[in-house]
Image (spheres, coloured by chain):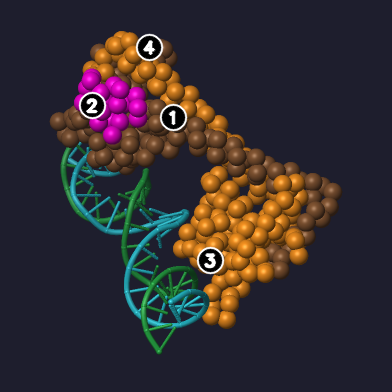
Chain colours: A brown, B orange, C cyan, D green
Amino acid sequence: MGNAGDARVGNADDDKHADDDKHADDGEHAGLSIGEVADATGLSVHALRFFEREALFLRPIPRTGGGRRVYAPADVEWLALCNRLRASGMPIAELKRFAGLVRSGPGNEAERLALLQEHERAVRARIADLDASLEIIHGKVVAYEKHVREGTAAGVWAPAPSR
Amino acid sequence: MGNAGDARVGNADDDKHADDDKHADDGEHAGLSIGEVADATGLSVHALRFFEREALFLRPIPRTGGGRRVYAPADVEWLALCNRLRASGMPIAELKRFAGLVRSGPGNEAERLALLQEHERAVRARIADLDASLEIIHGKVVAYEKHVREGTAAGVWAPAPSR
DNA sequence: CTAGAACCTAGACTGCGATCTAGATCAAGC
DNA sequence: GCTTGATCTAGATCGCAGTCTAGGTTCTAG
């Protein structure tokens, strides 16, 4: 116990929520239903089943006798990382590849590293791009503010551009 | 002429490319074909026709006798702004609304301003979100680098998470 | 025991934003 | 005149990432 697959590789921000036992449910604080995981991660139950079909988990999610999924806290941690990767633009296909690497155990850390580095690069590029767009948009906003405030027609604002 | 509708509202970075006449084509440096505009904007000819169907231009694009579209430089400038707005996540529907406002001429500048301000806010939020994700991802990268470099097993990297 | 909530599967559907196809027309060079 | 390439229209198709439906099963509370 205690190792969360990869979801917490060496991060110092672990270890602090080990068992806060928020539900005061049953004795065992683990064993989450799909609905609980949905609440905890912000993903819909549909999305969670979809993720499973897509093999985005680090393990086959076990079931109860009745066939219901039983998640562990580590799954939720992994999903939190998935959310971050997705939110930063990683396509499902690449996330799937990453999950596959982690799932197949030690020995491919360099490959995982390369994948993450590439993604980091992509995210930085995306941010730089957004910054560039932002500058232009902000310029527009400033110009419009001036225009609206002062009534200056610093341009003719014609419906049809020139010629 | 010389007013580019809105595509350059008061921005100081205009006026500098007025007619660089890059093609050394015919005497008139304006009057671009759809292919030229595609090259100039990075949009596909399909996308340009799609944009037109969606009423994203500031005017009806005129045609030659033979039915071909004839774009003006101002159209290209407008498309450059569109590209920035799209690249920063503005949906087509909102871009269409903005184009409609500009197209309907003066009198709604406050509305345009509000739209742009809202978009600027959204872009800043998106950047902040990406920054947050980046921090986490970078943390992973650092941890993996350390792991790969030092062989430290700071976590068990098990295929199946805990329990 | 029964009602209702939560869950199950397989598969169809959605929205966005293009992108591509078919079949025709136009324009330029030889 | 003919070929070649760019363009035209209308409409079909695509990829992504879920989202939803239908038709059932399981669990929990009263």
- The residue drawn where x is 33% and y is 10% is B150
The residue under label 3 is which amino acid type? Answer: Ile
Relative depth, front residue between B143 and A65? B143
Q: Are marks 3 and 4 on the same chain?
A: no
Q: Is residue A131 left or right of residue A98?
A: right
- The residue drawn where x is 43% and y is 20% is B139
Q: Are marks 2 and 4 on the same chain?
A: yes
Q: Earlier in the sequence, mark 1 or mark 2?
A: 2
Q: Percent position (x, y) of residue B31?
A: 62, 68
Chain ID of residue with mark 3: B
Q: Magenta segment range?
A: A97-115
Quick check: is A107 in the magenta stretch? yes
Q: Is residue A9 left or right of residue B124?
A: left
Chain ID of residue with mark 2: A
The residue under label 2 is which amino acid type? Answer: Arg
Quick check: is B69 in the magenta stretch? no
Residue B106's place in the image compared with B151, above or below, is below
The residue that mark 3 highlights is B34
The residue under label 4 is which amino acid type? Answer: Asp
Alpha-carbon distance for marks 2 and 4?
Answer: 22 Å
Nearer to us: label 1 or label 3: 3
Query: For numbered disc 2, what is the local secondary structure?
Result: helix
- The residue drawn where x is 74% and y is 43% is A142
- The residue drawn where x is 76% and y is 50% is B10
Q: Main secondary structure of the magenta part?
A: helix
The residue that mark 1 highlights is A120
